[in-house]
Amino acid sequence: MQLSFLSFIPNHAGPAGAAAALENGLQLFRFAEELGYDTGWVRVRHFEPYLSSPMTFLAAVSQRTSRMHFGTGVLPMRYEDPIRVAEDASTLDLLSGGRLELGLSSGIPTPGILDPVFGSSPLGFSAEAQKRVLRLRAALEGAALVNSGSGFMSIPADTDLRVSPSAPGLPERLWYGAGTVSSAARTGAQGFDLQVSTLNSEETGVSFEEGQLAQIRAYREAYAARGGRPAPNVAAGVARNGAAGHPVAAAVRHLTAGAVTRDPRITAGRIIVPLETDADRAEHRAFIEGYRSGMYADGRHHDPNVPLRFSRIFDGSPERITDDLLADRALAESTQLMVTLPAEGSLAAHKRILRTVAERIAPHLGWAGDARPAATAAAATAAAAAPGYGTAA
């Protein structure tokens, strides 16, 4: 079992606090590396007081860390330019020495708000997102995107143009965030690694854990069955969007290239909030109460017309949290625990969560940790008390 975390990089202080919030986010990643975390993930949000430009932030992370991987959880591809993402991601991966984990998804379907900003599509939300996801992967794999014709800038005539720079290995570090059994199966058929989070975006009449377990098993089955057969929806996408020379067709050729050569990776997000002191309880009370107020005890939304099922919060003592996580059947079939930090909370509080999980919970779940020098471990402990997000560091 690997150990990772997910952060919004929240800014609680408005425009004046944005720079300090970003700096504190960098400190959080550095602290997590010192604790031995394998990967740090960031959420992506447009027009909210959270991180909106993940590639620039992660480029800074790459220069503050040396070992830990980092990535997006997830990049909303419906409203992203896949070629620009490919250029930025390749550059970032090279700067970091091959440590980028690129998590993708369609995004939150709010076309009435975001289509006027980022552009509409006749394909519809999901189909357009899938088209862009596959175009991104094709670009990262070196597919020819266009021909230079009579010559383009410094490029000679009749040359196939590809994304530059090239980042070898990055196409094997692409993840997709699924929330339904069908999207998880599609993710497996397409050969992506899988991210499952704290929300199932379908209501199937079973618990959150059982619903997510069904997603993971559908993903594994589809991933193992890929062989030389493309996913039907991908093949259909080629029929809609272009023939053999089209970048989407390159994704199909990738799927038909042969048997899978490695085991799939699955990261499962869980909201973990250790509560050991009165300060912990005071810090997280509003978040916990607000989160639980929006759902029934079994995770169903109060509105029966909203087909969502939410994960519980794993709170209380480290021992209780450990027992609850050990009983989580979906987590047991994952390869990485993603500690989903509360959307709110100070930097110091988030550091305490990361430290408690790394030192008192994750080792009991099968995480081997990182063989850190004693001085580094001591530095991580000393750094746990720090200014909050949006305040001067």
Image (tube, rainbow, N blue to C red):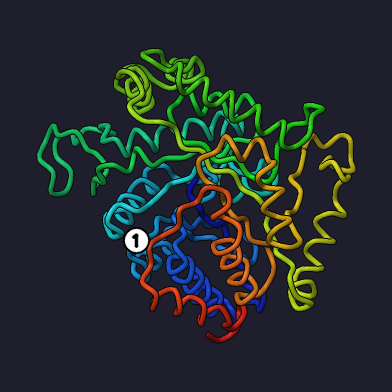
Q: What is the count of numbered marks?
A: 1
Q: Which residue is mark 1?
A: 67
Give the image quarter of residue 241. top left
Q: Is residue 113 above or below residue 179?
A: below
Left or right, residue 209 beside residue 384 = right
Residue at 63% x, 44% y: name it: 197
Label 1 is placed on what type of residue? Arg
Looking at the picture, tell me which residue is in the foreground, 141 or 226. Answer: 226
Tell me, yes or no, if residue 239 can be seen here: yes
Looking at the picture, tell me which residue is in the foreground, 239 or 98. Answer: 98
Looking at the picture, tell me which residue is in the foreground, 24 or 144. Answer: 24
Residue at 38% x, 62% y: name it: 371
Residue at 68% x, 49% y: name it: 113
The percent position of residue 234, horizontal first and vertical second, equals 46, 20
The percent position of residue 52, horizontal first and vertical second, equals 54, 60
Q: Is residue 89 above or below residue 149?
A: below
Provide the secondary structure element on which disc 1 rests: loop
Tell me, yes or no, if residue 111 can be seen here: no
Q: Is residue 327 above or below residue 56?
A: above
Hey, which residue is sitting farthest bottom in the picture?
A: 392
Left or right, residue 13 beside residue 313 = left
The percent position of residue 137, horizontal first and vertical second, equals 38, 35
- Pointer 1: residues within 10 angstroms few (<14), some, or many (20+)? some
Give the image quarter of residue 359. bottom right
Left or right, residue 92 beside residue 165 = right
Looking at the picture, tell me which residue is in the foreground, 268 or 182. Answer: 268
Residue at 40% x, 55% y: name it: 69
